[in-house]
Each structure stands twice: as structure tokens, then as C-alpha cells.
Image: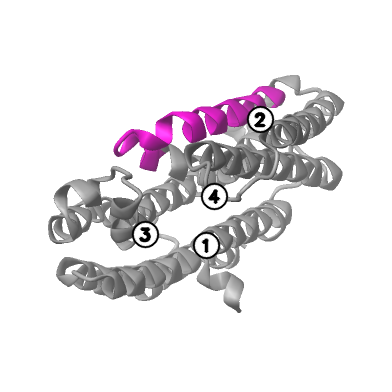
Amino acid sequence: MNVLKKDQAQMMLQVIVAVLLFRFVLFESLITDLGLSKLHYFAFLIAIGFILYGGVLLYKIVLQEEFPDRNIEKSIEKSYYKYLGVNAVGIGIAFFAASDIDRTYYFGFFLGLAAILYLYITQWRKILVFDNIVYSLIISFPFFILILMDLMPSLQMNAEQNPEKQQLLNISLQICVLLWFLYFIKTILMDLKFMELDIKHKRRSLATIHGREIGAKRTTFLSLLPLTLIAIFCVIHFNLTLLIGYIGVLVILPYLIYLGKLWKAKTTEDFNGINNFLNIIIWLTIFSIVVLFFNLK
């Protein structure tokens, strides 16, 4: 499928699959008193979709303003109104859904997402490293908001009396943090992959400043952080033998191959292949949710 060759499309697909697996494979099968009904769950997902789509519209507007010779948006004024309208619909859906389940404060998370997207696109995407951190947080936002809205409410009253729920919460958060780290590494890989294009358009990144050879070595060392998290996870949850076996064979081993390839990478083709390899590792990490379900079940 051609759509899977595009990084942004594939990341969005990964996020959608992950939040569906968290809810319908893991949470709904093991927890009876989740915070969101199916209706409110999909309402919040739709709200996130509207706000993220608003970010895409704003990015096109900003690109048109930065490169007036391009034909990205025909009318900037109309595009701004469309951007405001899409955000208003998304935030409105989030507000009414949150009010209906008596947790109005959830609405603030979506307002915050819209604000972060605005700041990122207009200002933060030009700040070295910080833009990578924020971008990966935006991608990972649905994971964390789902746990906060769906799993946390069932633990707020009697957390000490529900060790199984507490374990599920801890493991889910650890998987989400790992995914955020992997997406953070991925954004740096994309900078290395598109270094020549960034130089052509005079965009600053760590890759354009220090070059690919230094960038490959630095990213390899940085990639040891997710591997360390995985190793700590395996030690903490050694009793989950099925999950640990899956992680050892289908996550850690491919990750070690990825590190070896990254250390030697020099060309655009090298980084393109490594980026695709990291995508496979992210997919395998996401499907560990299914393995976790069977292990806990």
C-alpha cells in the first residue's frame, strides 16, 4: 500500500491501531468499570481527529506564508477561518462529551493539545531538539489521554484494593512512554533522512548542523535509552513470561539489528531503510498489547 510509505500516514495508522487495541483488546476485556462508554470513547477520538486536522491546516497556512511562490493554499484568510472552525468543532465535541460523563476537566487536555499544536507549528518547530520532543508528544497524546480518561477513573476510589488494575495501569503507561521514546528517535531519524532537503530550504536541524556521520553516531547512543527502558521493563515484569518472551525475540533482537545498521549509516538510502526498520519495531511494540492481554488473561 502506497499510503504506508508515507511516514505521517503510517504514524497516524499506528496511533489508531494502538488506541483501539488498548481499549477493545486490553481494557474492555479485563476491566468492567472503565471511565468512558463506547460512545464517549469514539467522541473523544473524533475530537482528537478534528484538532489534529486543524494542525495540518495551520501547517499548510504557515508554509504558504513562508513560501508565497508556492500554491499550497489559495486563500490564507479562508484557510484561517477553516482552521478555527475545525478546532472549534473538535473542542466542542470534547467539552460536551466530558460534561456528559461528569469529568469536565478532561476538556482542558484537548484545549491544551490545540494550543501546543499552534505553538509548535508557528514557533517551536524551529527550535532544535525541542521541536522533536514536542512533535513526538503530539503523536503520543492519544495514548496518554486514553489511559487518563478510560483507566484512571476506575482506580481513583480504591486503588489499593485493585492490584490487578494498578498493574495494568503501570504496564500501559510504561508501553506509552516507550512508544513516545521511539517516536522521538524516529523524528531525529527523519531529520537525518531529509537532511539534503532541509539544507535546500535552509531549515536548521541537528542533521544540517553536524552532518549525517556524527548524527548517526549520536542517534545510536540516544537509541540506547529505549533499549534501557525495555530491559528495565523485562526485569520488573519478569513474571509475565509470555510477554517477556515476545519482547525478547520480536522487539529486542530487531532493535539490536537496528542499532548496528544505524551506527554504519551514511546515505539517504541508509537512513530510509533504518527508518522503515524502526517502523517495524514500533508495530511490534504496539502488538505487544495483544500479547499482554493473553498473558494477563
Mark 2 vs 1: CB contact within 8 A: no
Along the viewing direction, whichever of 60 and 257 lies nearer the viewer = 60
- Number of other residues with Cα within 10 Å of mark 1, as a class: few under 14, some 14 to 19, many 20 or more: many
The residue tagged 2 is 110
Residue 1 percent location from the top left of the image: 61, 79
Residue 251 in percent (x, y) is at: 38, 69
The amino acid on which the numbered mark 4 sits, given as a three-letter code, is Arg
Secondary structure under tag 3 reads loop
Q: Residue placed at 62% from the left, 35% from the top? A: 148
Q: CA distance from mark 4 to mark 1?
A: 38 Å
Q: Nearer the viewer, mark 4 or mark 1?
A: 4
Residue drawn 22% across and 55% down?
219
> Residue 191 lies in magenta, yes or no?
no
Residue segment shown in magenta:
107-133
User: Disc number at residue 125?
Assistant: none
Instruction: Provide the residue designation for mark 4.
Output: 70
Mark 3, other Cα within 10 Å: few <14 / some 14–19 / many ≥20: few
Amino acid type, mark 3: Phe
Q: Quadrant of the C terminus?
A: bottom right
Q: Which of the numbered marks, if any, corresponds to residue 286?
A: 1
Gap in Å between the C-alphas at discs 2 and 1? 24 Å
Q: Secondary structure at mark 1?
A: helix
User: Cα distance, mark 4 to mark 2?
Assistant: 32 Å
Residue pointed to by mark 3: 238
